[in-house]
Image (tube, rainbow, N blue to C red):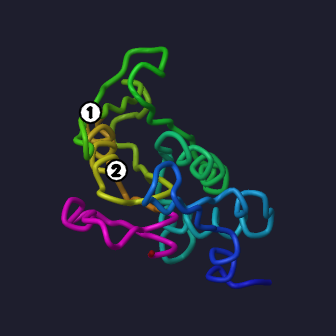
Amino acid sequence: MRSLDQVLQDGIRDIRDYPQAGVVFKDITPLLADHSGFTQVVEALAAAGRDADGNVVVDKVVGIEARGFILAAPVALALGTGFVPVRKKGKLPSATFEESYALEYGEATIEVHQDAFAPGDRVLVIDDVLATGGTVEACLRLVRRCGAEVVATSVLIDLSFLPWRERLAGERVDTLVTV
């Protein structure tokens, strides 16, 4: 069996100048197509939802739109918990809470259903890439606003050259690969 480091190295490729000139996009589709590798990644992300003895310590797993959904749903299955989508504004059909956050040029808003969590639910947040931390920070505010407790955030790729650490200081953030 390949090591997790080898799986990540083999499964994440750089696409230069996508979606615009000067950007190096981290393409995870080769990883997703590799059943064995994808399974290892799901288990590694799910580790943040278990204690040292392997017991599940979360009630729900949140996935942040859009690639976070692809990772979070199987993590929820691996942990035996429910999955909660956090979506862009206007994409959820029932009553929602929303949080806005700053982008490099402008603002974005994410939402979660108001009834997505029971009071005191313990939550693991999953996303694909951690850059400035704005989306994750807004997601954590949403989860807490619903009366749930954030146990940890688990992310596939950490872009260490961007300032997410300052923004998420004091939060438990686990990452699988640092770029």
Question: Quick one: quadrant of the N terminus?
Answer: bottom right
**How far apart, in angstroms, are the residues tagged by discs 2 and 1?**
11 Å
Whether 155 is drawn above or below 62: the answer is: below
The number of callouts visible is: 2
Q: Is residue 164 left or right of residue 118?
A: left
Judging by the rendered image, the residue that carries numbered circle 1 is 99
Q: Earlier in the sequence, mark 2 or mark 1?
A: 1
Q: Quadrant of the C terminus?
A: bottom left
Give the magenta part as a residue range: 156-178
- Judge by depth and name the residue closer to the eye, 45 or 16: 16
Q: Residue at x 53, y 48 (%)?
A: 68
Packing grade of label 2 (10 A; few <14, some 14-19, many >=20) is many
The 10 Å Cα crowd at callout 1, few under 14, some 14 to 19, many 20 or more, is: some
Q: Position of residue 164 (x, y in %)?
A: 27, 63
Q: Residue at x 40, y 34 (%)?
A: 118
Residue 105 drawn in magenta? no
Instruction: Give SS at disc 2.
Output: helix
Callout 1 secondary element: strand
Residue 170: say if magenta. yes
The answer to whether residue 105 is left or right of residue 87 is left
Task: Check disc 2 and report the residue beneath it.
Answer: 136
Looking at the rendered structure, the kind of residue marked 1 is Glu
Query: Label 2 sits on what residue type?
Result: Val
Q: Position of residue 108 (x, y in %)?
A: 30, 34
Using the image, determine if residue 11 lies above or below residue 117: below
Q: Measured along the vertical axis of the image, is residue 109 above or below residue 66? A: above
Residue 16 drawn at (x, y percent):
55, 62
Residue 75: % across, % down: 61, 54
Q: Residue at x 49, y 63 (%)?
A: 24
